Amino acid sequence: MPPLALKPDASFFRKIALGAVGSRHVAQDLERLGHRMVELERGAMDTKLWKDVKRKRVRIPDLVCELCGLRIESRAKTRPDLSMSHSSSDHERAWDFGMVNADVIAFPVCKAGEDEQWSAGRLQESVSYWHERNWIRWHAEGTVNYVRVARFRAVSRDGETTKGVTEGSETSVTWKAWFSSRDGFVESVTGQRITTVRASDGHRYTRTVPEELRITVAVGEEIALNQILASRVRPETDDDLRCPGVWPEGHLSQLLASRERTQRFTGVKLARLRRKDSVWATVASLERDREEDMYIRLEAAAYLVAVRGESAEHLFAPYLASPDQQIRLEAVISLGEAGTDECVRMLSAILDDHQRPYFARSAAAWSLSRIGGLEACSRLVRAFADVDQDLREEALEGIVTLDSDAVPVLLAGLQEMEPAIAAGCAEALRQHGAVSDETLRELTAQLASGNPSVWAVWLVGHLPREPLAGAVADLQETAPELHYAITLLWSFVESWIARRWELQPDANLPDRNDGR
């Protein structure tokens, strides 16, 4: 049984969310040093999973800088430490698999604040029901520590522990370090004794650092919460990490020619992101090489489509027809990364094809949401009427991520005759949160038309009262029934029962007479 098979879904998703939050914070943190970080490992900054298809992908650092090629592996923590998951028996699950000495490992600390948990259970006749909700507002805490892979490899590990069964019984390796518990500055360093002063009130703290640890800060240096003060491995400084703004001489060619597959993958991805036409022959040879890693071949296909304008249909047809589910899934995702108009049409066709497995149609919807644009938005809206309820929810989740780009399509969708489409458009607009003045004007106009759609009324009743109060008040004379309906909805949304409201326990079960 794979280790992750033992992780409860809630625990596993929490770890996925922690990792995505950490990667996003690292990318943002490195912007201050001039980097332009993007995902290298697909999904490093997202929580999207396809549970019915096991994805055995190239293990690769999470992020890469488009400008200088620096690769970053993010290991998010809930408390400061230098530990990583590791396997001594499976080399592909070793802590440093797929990384080279120049790569950097980041250790952001992310805390779960405002952790609200709610559960409800009941028994109604023959139907039992249990529902949990867990809302967490994550926030990064303190500084991010960065350490080169070469420095970890140069010293022996200090500890090795096995996690509990709910964490997949994975092994964790550790290097000792001492971290600052406050913002402040270093007042003195004498031998292995270090004195720091807290910035908030000037309070002094003196501590003797173990002999095996090397103090990594100097007298007078400002320090931040969670910063490494002493360790067996030296952390990178801002000067070490500052982006030069250019790739090293011959860097792209070296990546593409590397014997390390994660380096080749990085080279192909950077070539696509920077639209480097000069290496097209090398990339094309990687795509044609049947002994090359499939993940690299698919990235090469995406490059040839996006940069060289080659036919997506011609390049991706063999992958989409593969008997291997994993390859088909990765092919759909790679189409989304290529992102051309032809790719949008192909993804739309996959989404329309009810003969395809759910994972392929789901990936098509997800990929369309990553591409964005009018055609992709319109296709996602049409999916609100799909016979597969899960696919409707996939389309809804995807179009919400598009924010303002999707708003015109969603506003028009409120007038759709198909109730499922109008309902999906109303819910997507509700989930967008902040509503622009233009959207408010359009909704007000629909209310004043005298014949607004049911879902336009529902949406107004689920938006904040203040910006629409005046327009709704005007309806009291012209359309009293409409005024009453909206104010009733507002009363419900603002009440205490709305926070815990849900359908009856058996509302989502198949009808007992439908033969199932």
Image (cartoon, rainbow, N blue to C red):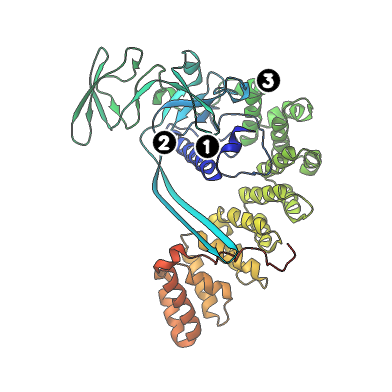
Q: Is the Cβ of the residue at disc 3 closer than 8 Å to that at disc 1?
A: no
Residue 65 shows up from this direction: no
Answer above or below: position of 485 versus 222.
below
Q: Residues within 10 Å of mark 3 (few under 14, many from 20)?
A: some
Residue 106 shows up from this direction: yes
Instruction: Kindly state the secondary structure of the residue where label 3 is placed.
Output: helix
Q: Residues within 10 Å of mark 1 (few under 14, many from 20)?
A: some
Q: Position of residue 174 (x, y in %)?
A: 45, 22
Answer above or below: position of 370 versus 206.
below
Indicate which disc residue 78 carries. 2
Q: Quadrant of residue 267?
A: top right
CA gap between label 2 and label 1 equals 17 Å
Which amino acid type is marked by label 3?
Answer: Ala
137 with respect to 122 (left or right): left
CA gap between label 3 and label 1 equals 41 Å
N-term-proximal mark, 2 vs 3: 2
Viewer-nearest residue: 76 or 304: 76
- Quadrant of the rendering where the C terminus is positioned: bottom right
According to the picture, the residue beneath numbered tag 1 turns out to be 166
According to the picture, the residue beneath numbered tag 3 turns out to be 257
Residue beneath the point at 24% across and 21% down: 207
Which amino acid type is marked by label 2?
Answer: Thr
Instruction: Kindly state the secondary structure of the residue where label 1 is placed.
Output: helix
Q: Quadrant of residue 227?
A: top left
Q: Residues within 10 Å of mark 2 (few under 14, many from 20)?
A: some
